[in-house]
Image (tube, rainbow, N blue to C red):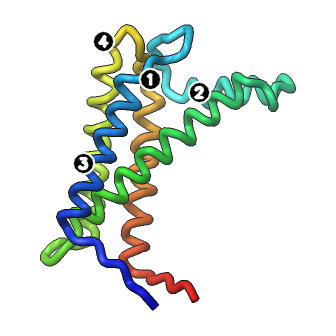
Amino acid sequence: MRVVRIGKKTEGLLLVVYTAVLLAVTLLLKGGSGVRTNLAPFEDIARILVRAGHGGVLSNALLYAVVGIVGNLAMFALWAFLLWKFLDGQGRTPARNHVDVILVGALFSLGIESVQLFLPTRAADINDVFWNVLGTIAGSALAHLHRNVRFEWE
């Protein structure tokens, strides 16, 4: 069986590259038509429930809303996983890693949404912060689980 070990330099490089990609996707790509700022918490969930309740389960609007939520969760879960792995090491407890990753993830997400507020091609959305932080928590938990579980492929 072959074991691949990733050192701190490689972990750091992966984190920096992925952070740059995440920033490019969230700040540089042009948003869709009708770009608008949303400061109403859980408005995206309410829209999904209304669409689903009116038989619009297979509508484009519902699909875009779900993809947006899943995208935010996945982007920040991967970012948090990489950050947790980078921070983990001698002298650091898992609890400290979780606190640091979740705090930095929340601040990172707030920073992105704050910048988007002033960009004409992007829209700030308070719900994105919620989904990003939830993704950060999931990524942090997966990194901790990965620390204690070893997968072996035969």
Q: Secondary structure at mark 3?
A: helix
The quadrant in which residue 19 appears is top left
Q: Badge 3: few (under 14), some or many (20 or more) residues near its Cα, within 10 Å?
A: some
Q: Earlier in the sequence, mark 1 or mark 2?
A: 2
Residue at 31% in and 41% down: 106
| Front tag of 4 and 3 | 3
From the image, tell me which residue sits under label 2.
Answer: 44
Q: Earlier in the sequence, mark 3 or mark 1?
A: 3
From the image, tell me which residue sits under label 1.
Answer: 125
Q: Secondary structure at mark 2?
A: helix
How far apart marks 4 and 3 lie (CA) works out to 24 Å
From the image, tell me which residue sits under label 3.
Answer: 16
The quadrant in which residue 45 appears is top right
The reply to whether callout 4 and callout 3 are in contact (CB within 8 Å) is no
The reply to whether callout 1 and callout 2 are in contact (CB within 8 Å) is yes
Q: Amino acid at mark 1?
A: Asp
Labelled disc at residue 118: 4
Q: Amino acid at mark 2?
A: Asp
